[in-house]
Image (cartoon, rainbow, N blue to C red):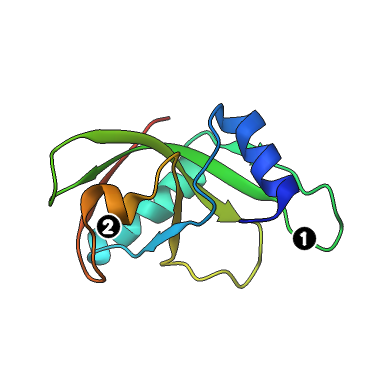
Amino acid sequence: MALDWVQDALLRSLGFAPYPATLNVRPLDAEDARLWQMIQREFASVPLLSVDGDFCSARLYWVGIQGFGKGDQTIKGAVLLPDVADYPKDKIEIVAPVRLKGLFGLKDGDRLALEFND
């Protein structure tokens, strides 16, 4: 995500300059995995088009992000889903204007709540 064109495209599409790394999470259980698949099929997304044939396009889904450690605030962000055929079905990449691990005091294995906004 440190590529300049990606940063610029995310700023234009989302209206905020994202922290230059994604936070990768996975669904907690089978029900969460089913919900994630349904969101991909049925929710509106914002296209993120590649300006370079060497890189893939992606879809963005608006989310509210809440951690369960430090504080109880909700941060506006997006889930970035690359348009790649073999992309892992259980991988969820989150972009936000801040470093989420630092803001919420996250360690590997900690939980987050994502509220998808259609």
Give the residue number, with chain letter if any, for mark 2: 32
Q: Residue at x 31, y 56 (%)?
A: 101
At mark 2, the secondary structure is helix
Give the residue number, with chain letter if any, for mark 1: 55
Give the position of the N terminus as an image quadrant: bottom right
Instruction: Give x and y (percent) for residue 107.
Output: 23, 67
Does 85 sit above or below residue 42? below
Q: Nearer the viewer, residue 108 or 53?
A: 108
CB under 8 Å between callouts 2 and 1? no
Q: Residue at x 14, y 47 (%)?
A: 70
Instruction: Give x and y (percent) for residue 99.
Output: 39, 50
Is residue 33 shown left or right of residue 43? left
Does 84 sit above or below residue 117? below
Q: Residue at x 43, y 30 (%)?
A: 118
Q: Nearer the viewer, residue 39 or 76?
A: 76
Instruction: Give x and y (percent) for residue 2.
Output: 63, 56
- Which numbered disc, 2 or 1, marks the residue that appears first in the sequence? 2
Q: What amino acid is at disc 1?
A: Phe
Q: Residue at x 41, y 67 (%)?
A: 90
Is residue 111 shown left or right of residue 61? left
For marks 2 and 1, give the CA distance.
Answer: 29 Å
